[in-house]
Amino acid sequence: MSTYEKPDFWAIKAKKEGYPARSVYKLQEIDEKFHLIRKDLRVLDIGAAPGSWSLWILKRLGGTGFLSAVDLSPLGMSAPTENFFFIQGDLYNPAVRQALLDHGPYGLVVSDAAPSTTGNRIVDQGASEAIVEAIIGYSFATLKAGGAMVAKIFQGGAERELLDHMKEHFTQARAFKPKACRAESFETYLVATGFKGT
């Protein structure tokens, strides 16, 4: 059994606390460091399945604010409908994009999305980079001035160029790897704050 199949501390904690996946603690650590989520915020979660990030955000919003989420797969969670919108579909689909735009503008765009991996690190990094470029595009289109974004990327050198691009549109942008990431994982997160507007 690989270390990815073994339930570690974070996976056991997630199950105990009712979250579909251990990734929730990555977002928690990012939020604790960068103070991204507040009660009245409108948030867009891209690549939301199985739903841990969405569930945690809704708990943080506490019945205020609003969350939109999108994924190709259904969510493995139930959530209140009054301040939550989920659309199952492809983020590249114009109709999906328009539905998400209609529920904006947002103060925060987050994404824990990752491509289906092939085992070829170069191919997987390229696919991850393409997803992050799409997330950045969504951020530029949907964020209010002063907003923030978080996106997962497989490390491979492209993150520096992406961060330089983000710094043109945000007051700050940096890479951050939460402790909840597996030690053998080559993922990290790009975090940008202070969107300058379009």
Image: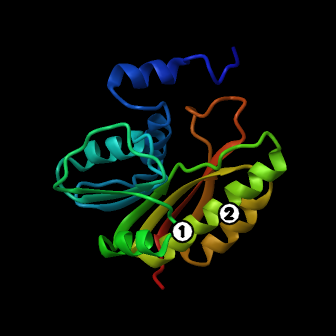
Residue 142 point in image, percent of width and height: 42, 74
Front in this rendered view, residue 42 or 197:
42
Q: Amino acid at mark 2?
A: Ala
- Mark nearest the camera among 2 and 1 is 1
First along the sequence among labels 2 and 1: 1
Q: Which mark is residue 130?
A: 2
The vertical placement of 25 against 114, above or below, is above
Q: Secondary structure at mark 2?
A: helix
* Residue occupying the point 31% across, 75% down: 102
Along the line of sight, which residue is nearer the eye, 68 or 118?
A: 118
Q: Nearer the viewer, residue 153 or 89?
A: 89
Question: Viewed as shown, does residue 45 lie left or right of 162?
Answer: left
Task: Using a 10 Å C-alpha cutoff, classify the residue at mark 2 as few (fewer than 14 neighbours), some (14 to 19) or many (20 or more).
Answer: some
Amino acid of disc 1: Tyr
- Residue 84 vertical placement versus 1 (above, below): below
Q: Is residue 82 left or right of residue 135?
A: left
Q: Residue at x 71, y 56 (%)?
A: 127
Residue 124 rendering spot, x and y as whole percentages? 75, 49
Q: Secondary structure at mark 1?
A: loop
Location of residue 187 by image quarter: top right
Task: List x then y, in percent, for residue 89.
Answer: 45, 59
User: At x 48% / y 46%, what residue is drawn?
Assistant: 30
The residue that disc 1 covers is 92
Q: Residue furthest top?
A: 1
